[in-house]
Image (tube, coloured by chain):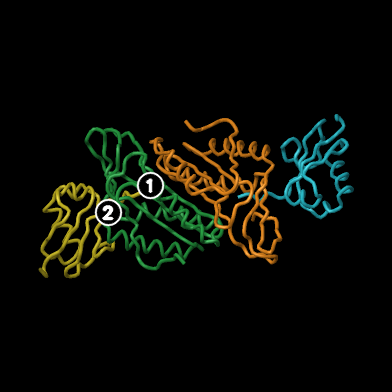
Chain colours: A cyan, B yellow, C orange, D green
Amino acid sequence: MPNTIHIKAFGMVAERIGATDLELAHCLDSEALLETLRAKFPELTTTKFSLAINKKLISGNQEIPENAEIALLPPFSGG
Amino acid sequence: MPNTIHIKAFGMVAERIGATDLELAHCLDSEALLETLRAKFPELTTTKFSLAINKKLISGNQEIPENAEIALLPPFSGG
Amino acid sequence: MEKERNPKNIFVQGAISPEAVAKSIANHASKTDIGGHSIFLGQVRADEKPEGKVIAIDYTAYEEMALEKAFEIREAIFAKYPLTCMHIYHSLGAVKVGELCLVVFTSSKHRKAAMDACDELVERIKAELPVWGKEILDSDNHVWKVNV
Amino acid sequence: MEKERNPKNIFVQGAISPEAVAKSIANHASKTDIGGHSIFLGQVRADEKPEGKVIAIDYTAYEEMALEKAFEIREAIFAKYPLTCMHIYHSLGAVKVGELCLVVFTSSKHRKAAMDACDELVERIKAELPVWGKEILDSDNHVWKVNV
């Protein structure tokens, strides 16, 4: 599916949206994706998380490549 | 022997003077003791060491109590 | 030498045993240029939360990203400090109170490099690896661990 | 609790085994207020000297004074850092290259106290304990170890 974004959710984010894997229609950039996500999962508006595109944390708005692997990452708490 | 000083030597000092335990006639203070030691063991004039009286390192000249336990301590190298 | 230049797995299933740490120590006896090892061990604490007492932490990770990041951190620390060896082990899944969930192990000729590198590694691992701890409580509730 | 307030022996005859370290780690599993352990291990290095290569270090100490001093250091570190436990082991006699001669082990609720206390303990032990290392060389000579 070329027009699909693959999304992985972790920790508290996965718990709140009730899923660890999602497929969404492609969004041009991370801002658009966040808007889509918040519309679909209102609970995310009160959840702190970062976005990773293809395993790299992003800051600011960033374009989303075709077939990107997106991850929704709540604050890390390893160790 | 009330007029005796008990001396323990360690590490390189013990090696240079060829003994780990000595008895010397009582000296009033540490300066006098060092003079006596250097006269008896000229090799100590070129050996770096500190004095401990009753298991406490001393700095400067210090009186030597009766029956004190004196130790000749080269620079520490534990660990 | 042990300066592996490829991502290596740092994750172990469940708690890390003291015996595994001993084995890792013993493996360094043949490296006779080592003068000091610095080891940090993370242990699961029975914290009291308003919702109950912690009895275990259940760890999950974004494994592929965590391994890439761990490799990046590893390379940076090797470039910064003159280390002989570096080992990182982190638990996944449930680790009970009193058990070990993290091992960071650095070795060098002189102690200072091993100690400083170990400290910096622990800080970076906690701040930068996508790993999450779910604190399981005795009340059947859970809370999400927060690193400070 | 383990905050012993009497001088305790820190000396062990010969090398310290990795298994002894593992046992010490395992003994802390029941202390569920511990969140982090910091361990420093000193290992005998095969240094090249002008007179030959080091094959072992033979340690001697002014034991009574060293134990008094270790106790003083221990008390000062317990007063300075919020530690749960502190353990110090130092070898006496011959320790071969690749073997362990020093273990400093601190535990606390949060990692920072354990790490800082461990670093400071190692520095103070090396600077302040009346212990001497005679480096035995493969040439049948020896040189006296110098701490830097």
Under mark 1, the amino acid is Ser
Q: SS of the residue at dot 2?
A: strand
Q: SS of the residue at dot 1?
A: loop
Q: Residues within 10 Å of mark 1 (few under 14, many from 20)?
A: some
Q: Chain under label 2?
A: D
**Is C63 situated left or right of C119 in this image?**
right
Both marks 2 and 1 on one chain: yes
Which residue shows up at 74% across the image and 46% down it? A10
Q: Chain under label 1?
A: D
Mark linked to residue D43: none
Q: Nearer the viewer, residue D142 or A48?
A: A48
Q: Quadrant of residue D3?
A: bottom left
- D101 up-or-down from B53: above or below: above
Q: Residues within 10 Å of mark 2 (few under 14, many from 20)?
A: many
Which residue shows up at 35% across the image and 65% down it? D7
Q: Is residue D114 visible?
A: yes
Which residue shows up at 40% across the image and 62% down it? D74
Mark linked to residue D61: 2
Quarter of the figure that contains the C terminus of chain C: bottom right
In this figure, which residue is indicated by the disc labeled 1?
Answer: D17
Q: Measured from the top left, where is residue C128 in percent x and y? A: 65, 45
Q: Nearer the viewer, residue D50 or A15?
A: A15
Q: Is residue B59 visible?
A: no
- C99 up-or-down from D53: above or below: below
Residues under labels 2 and 1: Cα distance?
20 Å
